[in-house]
Image (cartoon, rainbow, N blue to C red):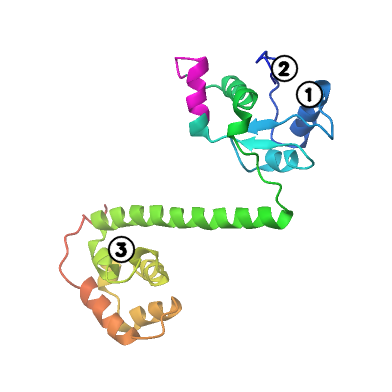
Amino acid sequence: MVDDAGQLLAKRHIADDAAGYKILLELLAEYGDTEEDPIPVAIEAARGLLVAVLRTGKRKVFAINPMAAARYRDRHSVSRKKSDPGDALVLANILRTDMHAHRPLPDDSGLGRAITILARAQQDSLWNRQQLAKQLRSLLREYYPAALAAFATWTNGLCRPETRELLKTAPTPARAVRLTRTQIQAALKRAGRQRGIEAEADRLREVFRAEWAHQPPLV
């Protein structure tokens, strides 16, 4: 906590729980925090339990982008060394000098916040799925090229339920070679495919049984 001149008034280390929030409220009250005129708070995270409780009432909570905070850090230190106390001081001084340049978190309703979290979760899941697909593609290229070729004709092939079902059914090239049409058709049906199952099963069986380079069995 700093005053209008940038003088350090107090500092505390708190946990992200009810006990930590109680310590923070007591500290704020000690320096003039009131219900009608609450002291604003800057924090890097825009979500979490501490942010949720800080946003109750009229208090303005500013979520400062870590990249923006890093630029402010250069004003106070040339070493660029990062520390929690140092970052906290930087955040406090951002509000002291440039509060007008930053927007507080909106006073959304509970439903509005829930929609925000849901949208962010969907975005994160899509990013995670793409990252996992890239990792899977790299592994298949090195150990199981037949599968990579088999799923390449599908849109978002490595993210499809058919891919997951077939890799569960035949997790190795040796197992894939032994797959029967019936087994492949059953895997496609379990994945939810309803059309062109027989033709797709024949295509997949042909790809799996083609000649491919292989790692040694133990590898």
Asked whether the residues under the numbered discs 2 and 1 touch, taking CB atoms below 8 Å apart as contact, a structural biologist would say yes
Q: Is residue 32 above or below residue 126?
A: above
Q: Which residue is mark 1?
A: 27
Camera-nearest label, 2 or 3: 2
Going by the numbered disc 2, the residue's amino acid type is Ala
The residue under the point 73% across, 53% down is: 109
Whole-percent x and y of residue 185? 36, 82
Q: Is residue 82 above or below residue 152?
A: above
- Cα–Cα span, label 2 and label 1: 8 Å
Q: Tag 3: Cα neighbours inside 10 Å, few (<14), some, or many (≥20)?
A: some
Q: Is residue 165 magenta?
A: no
Dot 2: element: loop
Residue 141 picture quarter: bottom left
Please tell me which of labels 3 and 1 falls first in the chain. Answer: 1
Q: Residue at x 73, y 41 (%)?
A: 55
146, 121: nearer the viewer: 121
Q: Quadrant of the N terminus?
A: top right
Q: How far is mark 2 from mark 3, CA to CA?
A: 61 Å
Residue 75 in magenta stretch: yes
Residue to which mark 3 is pinned: 172
Q: Report helix, strand or loop for mark 1.
A: helix
Q: Is residue 216 above or below residue 4?
A: below
First in sequence: mark 2 vs mark 3: 2
Amino acid identity at mark 3: Thr
Image mark for residue 219: none
First in residue order: circle 2 vs circle 1: 2
Q: Residues within 10 Å of mark 2 (few under 14, many from 20)?
A: few
Calculate the distance from the C-alpha at mark 3 to the C-alpha at mark 1.
Answer: 60 Å
Q: Which residue is mark 2?
A: 10
Q: Which residues are magenta?
A: 69-80
Residue type indicated by callout 1: Leu
Which residue occupies the foreground of this view, 24 or 186?
24
